[in-house]
Amino acid sequence: MTRSYPNTRLRRTRASAWSRSMHRETVLTPADLIWPLFVTDGQGVEDPVASLPGVSRWSVDGIASRAKEAMELGIPCIALFPNTQPELRSTGGDEALNPDNLMCRAIRAVRDACGSDIGILTDVALDPYTTHGQDGLLDDAGYVVNDDTVAMLVDQAINQAEAGADIIAPSDMMDGRVKVIRMALEMGGHHNIQIMSYAAKYASAFYGPFRDAVGSGDRLVGDKKTYQMDPANAMEALAEVEMDLAEGADSVMVKPGLAYLDLIWRVKQRFEVPVFAYQVSGEYALLEAGAAAGVGDRDALLMEKLIAFKRAGCSGVLSYHAPVAARILNG
Ligand SMILES: NCC(=O)CCC(=O)O
Ligand SMILES: [Mg+2]
């Protein structure tokens, strides 16, 4: 069967709003959003992140309020990232294992405020806790060592699980960490705690404002290219995803977002598993800067970008714009 004009006029179904709505292939709802939040020390603190206009670091009480706000907006899950106090950072990142660190206090505060009605996703990696800003432990040459780092990450994950996390999200890109974290969760009786693996995380120039937000940017020595992926590679991303799924990941993430839509599509087509995108800090900042410079309407630009993730096959998107988007969607 060939489609030809004028039997087929593809404009027919576009001629009215009701028909466009009836033929829409993809929908975006607040339930597709995960809201990343930055935690800072203190009480009653809102500390704006200069490079992310509209985004703040919140003290633990403020995080609980944001979690309630998320629930009211229909956002099912928040993601927590600590801005660890400078005096608690070390070369080994031991503060990651402290059961009373910012992350664990924030988890408990959200649980107290919201019960089990919201998902809490926690980041596993050492960069917010190290003096050098790398995601793992360094050898004498400054190389991030894999297996010793993984041993730390397992303890970090269990620390978060015991504080009440729902989804453990390792973002470190060490080999084999999903396997040992899953094993440790099972052995600890945490059978229903999920793992969302940052499976294909690229060494990207889009992470700058995030590093400001968690206070690792100025500290970072070198780059992260020995563990995060080369933006030129796609086959390798499929191998990363395949391994993390085999090791027990319940869902996988591609990061950053829009520049990697091809990977989202390929991962979804090949593995048919839940795929999430992280629309990262640089994407947020560029959209805000573009809209402020008059490039286009901020809300329209945002909605078009977010629907692209759904069209490509995402189950959901981590986005600093989550509350803005949910407000737009809720009308
Ligand atoms: N592990 C979380 C991130 O690295 C986020 C990066 C960003 O938002 O730029
Ligand atoms: Mg991997």
Image (cartoon, rainbow, N blue to C red):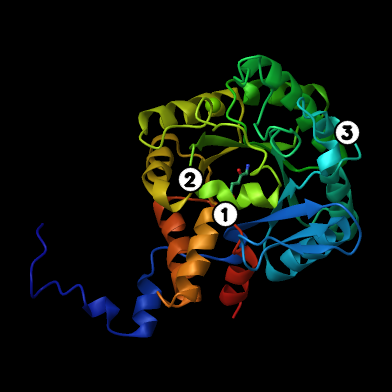
Q: Residues within 10 Å of mark 3 (few under 14, many from 20)?
A: some
Q: Earlier in the sequence, mark 3 or mark 2?
A: 3
| Percent x, y of residue 11 | 21, 77
- The residue type indicated by label 3 comes to Asn
Q: Earlier in the sequence, mark 1 or mark 3?
A: 3
| Percent x, y of residue 201 | 51, 37
Residue 83 drawn above or below residue 184: below
Residue that extends furthest to the bottom in the rendered view of this protein: 16
Q: Residue at x 80, y 21 (%)?
A: 187
Locate the C terminus and report the quarter of the image it occupies.
bottom right
**Label 1 element class:** helix
**Label 2 element class:** helix
User: Which label lies toward us, 3 or 2?
Assistant: 2
C-alpha gap between disc 3 and disc 2 = 31 Å
**Observer-nearest residue: 324 or 295?**
295
Q: Which residue is mark 2?
A: 205
Q: Earlier in the sequence, mark 1 or mark 2?
A: 2
Label for residue 98?
3
- The residue type indicated by label 1 comes to Ser
Residue 152 drawn above or below residue 18: above
